[in-house]
Amino acid sequence: MIHVACNIDSNYVEYCAVTLVSLFENNRGEPFCVHIVAGGLSSDEQEVLSDLAASYKNQVLFYTPDEKLLEGFAIRKFSKRISMATYYRCILSELLPETVDRVLYLDCDIVVLGSILPFWNTSLEGVGVAAVEDVGYDESERYKILQYPKEDSYFNAGVLLVNLDYWRKHDMANACIDYYHKYPERILFNDQDLLNSILHKDKKLVDLRWNVQDGFYRNPKVMSDSWKKKYGEVLKHPVILHYTNRKPWDYDSQHPLRQEYFRYLALTPWKGDIVLNNPINRIKRFFRLLPFYIKLRRAKYVRMGDL
């Protein structure tokens, strides 16, 4: 059994459905138990996700955390699109059954495009988490704020293979809560900063294909041979594609693989819920992107044909 966790609110039910369908479609030989941590989901919202999983012979379990656990917490970065639910991943070891010794946490701005079994089977001996470096890992200012060595690097918290046994042994949930209350001024990128602060010495960094973030697709200043060697194949063949910036459901998304999202949306009850089906959004998109069309602005993203 592969255990997967997502934490959402009502605003993300549709996006969660797309993430799960993409996961199930590309891992049909594997049984999944999905643990959805969410406060305030209606019975209808729970039912649609349960039915979707059941159609693939998989299971969904729901958890409603005590809101008091996050008393004093705040959303600082990206507050317009991120809710307090994002911090629930920090207390997964308290929420999930003790019979679950590891879990693959996935954000719901993700599509899975291949088998996750090799990642799932990653050894976690002696570490709390396996993750991919964040696109901003080289920004020195982050380490000054978080006050740990840059050599320890910085991971993206949207895809995490969590060693729950390790988390329980080291009481990670309370460690996160205590750290936040002690150093709230350090936590700018919300749960991601918090988890990096706690786990910077106790993690394993894995291949980029397990969390291919939006920033990796941005045009480099120079598309050198070394850049192509590092990013070329993984950008063409991501396993876990993570829309970390503008989302495919945003009218002005320029992500070169945004259509992958709609491919899996078509397999959910929200089939046809495409932002550009609205003529007004198409007009807005045209004028928003016109400077790129007429080359007044440099293209933000790589052309896939150039890789």
Image: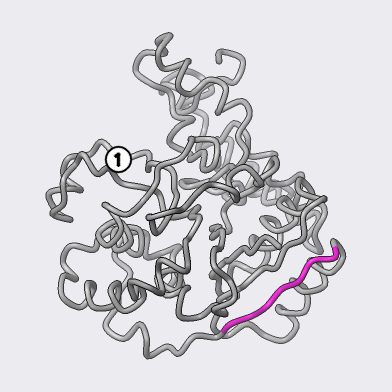
Q: Secondary structure at mark 1?
A: loop
State the residue at coordinates (62%, 72%): 35
- Up-down relation of residue 173 to residue 256 (above or below): below
The image's colour scheme reads one colour
Type of amino acid under label 1: Tyr
The percent coordinates of residue 59 (x first, y second) are 76, 71
The N terminus is located in which quarter? bottom right
Judging by the rendered image, the residue that carries numbered circle 1 is: 137
Magenta stretch, main secondary structure, is strand
Task: Examine the structure image and report whether residue 272 is included in the region drawn in magenta.
Answer: no
| Residue 252 relative to residue 195: left or right | right
State the residue at coordinates (20%, 48%): 142
How many labels, in total? 1
Q: Quadrant of residue 105?
A: bottom right
- Near mark 1 (Cα within 10 A), the count class, few <14, some 14-19 or many ≥20, is some
Range of the magenta residues? 57-63
Q: Nearer the viewer, residue 190 or 201?
A: 201
| Residue 24 relative to residue 228: left or right | right
The percent coordinates of residue 58 (x first, y second) are 79, 66
Q: Nearer the viewer, residue 118 or 276?
A: 118
State the residue at coordinates (57%, 80%): 97
